[in-house]
């Protein structure tokens, strides 16, 4: 495979859901489909979307190199962590940053961006 070759999945006019380059998968920010749920429900939806995209790319949550989490309200931090702790494999917690941010949809409580190694 060419070193500079980039593969993209679900390419739209504004973004791709995944780009793969040099053995690394870069996921676009994942957001909940059902924004009526509380932070735990929204976080579980987002983490399931991350799982699905990583699988399509040939990776998994145990190969995450970095997770960036954006919360609309830091009061949701504990609820997010409940969903995260259920999801992340024991002994495989990746480096992670969590910040408060104004999200594109006022009903979204969380958005997660992941970078992961393939394989």
Image: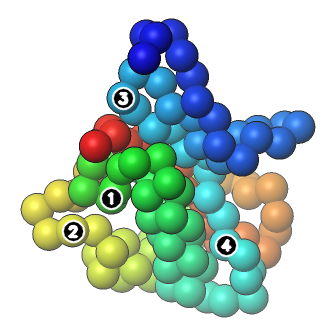
Disc 1 to disc 3, C-alpha distance: 15 Å
Q: Which residue is mark 3?
A: 23
Disc 2 to disc 1, C-alpha distance: 8 Å
Which element carries disc 4, helix, strand or loop?
Answer: loop
| Quadrant including the C terminus | top left
Which element carries disc 2, helix, strand or loop?
Answer: loop
Q: Horizontal placement of 64 versus 76: left or right?
A: left
Rendering coords of residue 28 (x, y %): 62, 45
Disc 1 to disc 4, C-alpha distance: 18 Å
Q: Which residue is mark 4?
A: 32
Q: What is the number of the mark on residue 89?
A: 2
Residue found at x 78% / y 75%: 107
First in sequence: mark 2 vs mark 1:
1
* Badge nearest the viewer, 3 or 2: 3
User: Is residue 16 depicted above or below 73 in this figure?
Assistant: above
First in sequence: mark 3 vs mark 2:
3
Q: Which residue is mark 1?
A: 61
Circle 2/circle 1 CB separation < 8 Å: yes
Find residue 60 and report its image quarter: bottom left
Which of 107/10 is in front?
A: 10
Rate crowding at label 2 as few (under 14), some (14 to 19) or many (20 or more) other CA atoms within 10 Å: few
């Amino acid at each position: 495979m060419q070193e500079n070759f980039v593969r993209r999945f679900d390419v739209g006019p504004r973004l791709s859901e995944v780009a793969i380059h040099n053995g690394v998968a870069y996921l676009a920010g994942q957001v909940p489909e059902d924004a009526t749920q509380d932070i735990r429900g929204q976080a579980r939806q987002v983490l399931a979307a991350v799982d699905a995209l990583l699988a399509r790319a040939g990776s998994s949550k145990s190969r995450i190199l970095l997770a960036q989490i954006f919360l609309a309200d830091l009061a949701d931090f504990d609820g997010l962590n409940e969903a995260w702790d259920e999801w992340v494999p024991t002994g495989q917690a990746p480096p992670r940053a969590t910040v408060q941010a104004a999200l594109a949809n006022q009903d979204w409580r969380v958005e997660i961006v992941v970078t992961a190694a393939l394989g």
